Amino acid sequence: MAQLPNNEQVLRALSRVQEPDLKRDLVTLKMIENLTVDASGISFTVMLTTPACPLKDKIEADCRAELAADFGDMPVVISMSARTLGQKTGRDLLPGVKNVVLVASGKGGVGKSTVAANLAVALARTGASVGLMDADIYGPSMPMMFGLQGQRPAMEGDKIVPIKKHGVHVLSIGLLIDEKQAVVWRGPMASNALRQFFTDVIWGELDYLLIDLPPGTGDIHLTLAQLLEVAGAVVVTTPQQVALADARKGAAMFNMTSINIPLLGVIENMSWFTPIPHPEERYFIFGKGGGRALAEEFGVPLLGQIPLVQGIAEAADQGQPVVLHEGNPSAVYYADLAGQVARAIAIRNVG
């Protein structure tokens, strides 16, 4: 019987496996845990930086290849787990939230809220703990998109508890007022209401809190930059030139000295139209390549392109984000988008 390797020899083999994004080996990154070697084989856990890691299969395959190179066909059991990283200095109001992510757009009508809702659900489906705050005080849409019309959040003492739906902790001004009531507030009133969404709400422990911003640039954006430590922002646009012109201003806002929030990347929505009966067909009805050009202009990745597919709007109107509908082609695109956003955050957090 061949002599069993010791833990040091196994770790030496695994030190040849790089985390593809972070460009460092798994041992140096302390991603190998619970390592045991006995007569039944080698077993250990790879602790990923996010449950939504899109490269977990490659990491596992690389581990197996390096172990086979040193120890032949010795049985190997690999468990994949995750510990989401965050960067906290203690400055902000949400100590239990590891990563705050802003979802922004330069103008309305580009599907920003639809993207935010589906991205939140997609992240939750990977096993991450996710919250979604609707910061569009004047035009809240999350109650409808999550099928929460008429519902009210619970209270714990004098604190509000977000409603959990589709695995996401959701809070919106639309859950606190009559849905037919117009919010006619001056900027300072809206900013004060937003502040209470952090000081008077029990968000608990979250891997990601997505904040759906109102379109454009204004008081809400400045308030968030002052109150919170933000992991990064994503900008949603369509390929259409008029949308890109406004999205460019939105992206530039995050680079301003008074804001200074990392831009994680660009999401291009309504990239093309695809008829569900003919998923191989693409019609670029709003133009082509605009999102990629914007991403290149700001030196950030194009995180995803979401097609315009029948059923997205209907799903939102029914309170069932389309990512839940596995037969719809858009579900695949949103699942991939969740991985890319989580990946961008992890790269920034590890540095």
Image: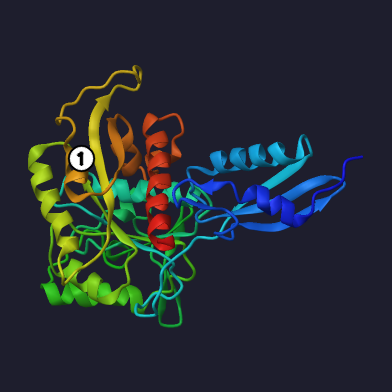
* Image spot of residue 297 (x, y percent): 16, 46
Graded by Cα atoms within 10 Å as few (under 14), some (14 to 19) or many (20 or more), the crowding at tag 1 reads: many
**Where 253 sits versus 166, above or below?**
below
Instruction: Please tell me which residue lies in front, 214 or 282.
Output: 282
Q: Position of residue 80 (x, y in %)?
A: 62, 49
Q: Quadrant of the N terminus?
A: top right
Closer to us: 23 or 38: 23
Residue 158 vs 13, above or below: the answer is below
Q: Residue at x 45, y 82 (%)?
A: 157
Residue at image location 40% in from the left, 64% down from the top: 99
Q: Which residue bears the numbered disc 1?
A: 291
Asked if residue 110 can be seen in this view, the reply is no
* Secondary element at tag 1: helix
Residue type at tag 1:
Gly
Residue placed at 23% from the left, 59% from the top? Answer: 213
Residue at the right extreme?
A: 1
Tell me residue 279's x, y (percent): 35, 21
